[in-house]
Image: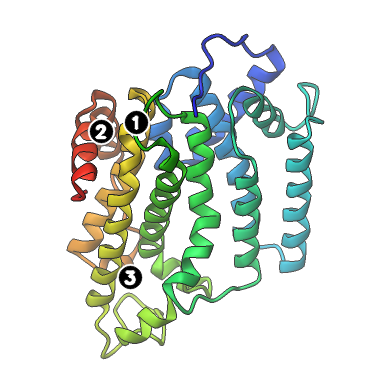
Amino acid sequence: MSATVEAQPQPSAPVQAAYSYCEAVTGQQARNFAYGIRLLPTGKRQAMSALYAFSRRVDDIGDGTLVPEVKRERLEATRALLDRIRTGEVDEDDTDPVAVALADSARRFPIPLDGLDELIDGVLMDVHGAAFETWDDLKVYCRCVAGAIGRLSLGVFGTQPGARGADRAPEYADTLGLALQLTNILRDVREDAGNGRTYLPADDLAKFGCGDGFHGDTPPAGSDFEGLVHFEVRRARALFAEGYRLLPMLDRRSGACVAAMAGIYRRLLDRIERDPGAVLRGRVSLPGREKAYVAVRGLSGLDTRHIARRAVRGRA
């Protein structure tokens, strides 16, 4: 798999305007991913912004205040738009800038657009109020809403010619998406509970005495909440270790992008591990200067080389 844009013609003015819109959406709303995307060359950065803007639209429908039936209608309408993009019906004269940008990206890169169908399926699971009894159940959801994004991104990044084990790159990209999503779930435990949602597997909650859910800024009485968090952190770290095997297969700037995005989430995971109760008191986040530092390290290759060495040794 390869993905290059250098030999391709520059986008027309309408397509360039569509990309500018998507980049603005990404810069304003992608609190963590924007730091990695900025490290990419222009063509890949634009394509990733188009993917983000479309994905953001899907997520916003699922997270919004509309009644479930209207959410389902909006999501299926978005799927119909994706079908138009997939069949080449969207051109530069379309009035939807996200559709224009994504259609152009799909012509320039081997993006597996079916991954966006999986994202829509995952958000529909949210709309239907799906519950997750086991980790295997939760993995299905995570693969839809995050693993698919990893595989879509790989369509833009491509792998280096002759990269060892490149046939497993989609698997590693998928697994890295799972690691990021599980980190998100840990970070948002209190917020999700306030919205009537619990994503952690019911089996795990019961094992640590947290089956009654999270309704305040302190752990449930008699529970081993710290044990639960540390258990899920270990699971996330194992996923990161497997997913980081992708890095040696990528070119320098694509690897820097992935290292920066994943590095920010690894630091979030570190904070959660040090103070599990913080996720019940508010949203755990990194200051902008720390995210920028992680991005600079990614571009310099320091984190990329370090993570890649540890991944190969199985110690990431």
Q: Are marks 2 and 1 in contact (CB under 8 Å)?
A: yes
Residue 60 in view of the camera:
no
Please tell me whether mark 1 sits on a helix, a strand or a loop.
helix
Measured as percent of width and height from the top left, residue 106 is found at 64, 29
Q: Which residue does the image show at 64% across and 50% down from the upper left? A: 58
Q: Amino acid at mark 3?
A: Leu
Measured as percent of width and height from the top left, residue 196 is found at 53, 75
Of the two numbered discs 3 and 1 on the same chain, state the one appearing first in sequence: 1
> Residue under circle 2?
304
**Mark number for residue 255?**
1
Label 3, label 1: how many angstroms apart (C-alpha)?
A: 33 Å
Q: Which residue does the image show at 78% across and 30% down from the upper left? A: 88
Q: Quadrant of residue 81 in the image?
A: top right
Residue 115 in view of the camera:
yes
> Residue under circle 3?
280
253 vs 177: above or below: above
**Mark number for residue 105?**
none
Q: Which residue does the image show at 62% across and 27% down from the upper left? A: 105
Question: Is residue 214 found left or right of 111 in the rendered image?
Answer: left
Label 2, label 1: how many angstroms apart (C-alpha)?
A: 6 Å
Q: Amino acid at mark 2?
A: Thr
